[in-house]
Amino acid sequence: MSISKRKQEHIDIAMNQSVKFTEKTNGFEHYDLVHCALPELNVEDIHPQIQFLNKPLSSPLMITAMTGGFEGAKAINAALAEACQSEGVALGLGSQRQMLEDENYLDSFTIAREKGPDIVLVGNIGAVQLVGMTNLSPVCYAVERIEADALAVHLNVLQEVLQPEGNIRFKGMLHGIEKIVKELDVPVIVKEIGCGISREVALKLVDVGVTVIDVAGAGGTSWAGIESHRADRNALAGQFWNWGIPTAVSLEMISDIESLTIIASGGIDNGITMAKAIALGADLCGAALPFLHAYSESGADSVAALIRQWKEAYRTALLLTGCQDTISLQNRKPLRTC
Ligand SMILES: Cc1cc2nc3c(=O)[nH]c(=O)nc-3n(C[C@H](O)[C@H](O)[C@H](O)COP(=O)(O)O)c2cc1C
């Protein structure tokens, strides 16, 4: 099956079928933020804004990688970029692998910078694609071509093992990451896609020069879930539907690694969960599937409305914890309730 066809299938399944973890949560329900009944702050004193990749974000939020590289992806990325531009949050594009083959769907990627001239925009490629590539200049060119501020390199071993057309040569991924970190002019973000990143893996990544990690933990979208809907063949995928490190656990495993900027994603579902993740040590939060569902309602408008809803709840959580800004919340350890 062509890459374009597969990308379309992933989006169709994620939009229309149940693909969330069924027996595992993101883990944030085990934490409560400590309520401050006496914040001594006015609402206008609250400043959720942060800087990410040298650009301002109105709130510590990013829509993470979903799509690109097929006909329908252009409209999705246009709407996501438009909403991110109007709401001042960051956007990750889906894997640019298809762009490395031909330019048939180039505009499904370049549309994002057109619609989001000021946004933090992140490109995307699989670590498995970097294995054995002696010349990385096509990847560097793909990042430049879409005017991205960073490249996300995804680790997706479970998905590759499960998909019929998967690339299952995993030896050399770390070396590939090391090379792309050295060669690219923009930072590299390493992310999972829903199974989380352990401390051991994070330390290996730090060792090769990675400075930003998106844990993309378990509790939201299950890629084994998506694969088990495909080609109704995948009994193995069904068994791994709930595999992975819950997002809150993954975050706790790595939150004390000082050199890292940490993105918490995987099942982040509202502004209060965002606040819990920040209090547990994340620098910003990410989410994918909730914004795809919002897009399917009425495009950019409903994506922007959902971003506003999360931002408002996040800001309210800052007030109710007595925190003037996002940095103050990072120093407010949440209560473990169970
Ligand atoms: C339809 C769909 C397509 C995705 N495609 C990519 C991709 O191309 N590259 C990538 O790094 N992650 C991809 N992801 C993973 C997301 O970026 C994210 O890590 C994961 O879905 C967990 O976040 P969530 O629980 O908020 O959905 C995709 C997710 C979805 C739902």
Image: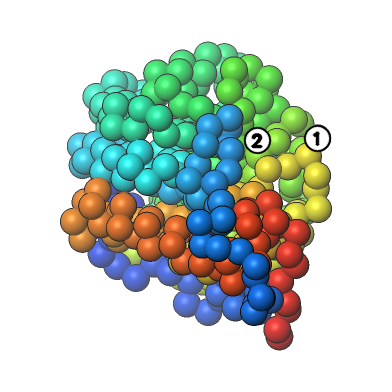
Residue 211 shows in the view: yes
334 to 203, vertically: above or below? below
Type of residue at label 2? Met
Nearest the camera: 318 or 300? 318
Residue of label 2? 173
- Could you give the CA–CA distance between mark 2 and mark 1, rounded to whole angstroms? 14 Å
- Callout 2 crowding tier (Cα within 10 Å): few <14, some 14–19, many ≥20: some
Q: Quadrant of the C terminus?
A: bottom right
Query: Residue at coordinates 51% horizontally, 67% vertically from top-left?
Result: 316
Q: Which mark is residue 272?
A: none
Q: Position of residue 235 (x, y in %)?
A: 44, 68
Q: Position of residue 28 (x, y in %)?
A: 61, 72
Q: Secondary structure at mark 1?
A: helix
Q: Which mark is residue 207?
A: 1
Type of residue at label 1? Asp
Residue 109 shows in the view: no
Query: Residue at coordinates 50% horizontally, 50% vertically from top-left?
Result: 59
Query: Residue at coordinates 51% horizontally, 62% vertically from top-left?
Result: 43
Query: Residue at coordinates 43% horizontally, 62% vertically from top-left?
Result: 312
- Callout 1 crowding tier (Cα within 10 Å): few <14, some 14–19, many ≥20: few
132 to 156, vertically: above or below? above
Q: How many marks?
A: 2
Q: Secondary structure at mark 2?
A: helix
Q: Position of residue 295 (x, y in %)?
A: 26, 54
152 to 282, vertically: above or below? above
Give the label, 2 or 1, closer to the camera. 1
Q: Horizontally, is 67 left or right of 210 in the view?
A: left
Q: Are marks 2 and 1 in contact (CB under 8 Å)?
A: no
In which quarter of the view is residue 116 placed?
Answer: top left
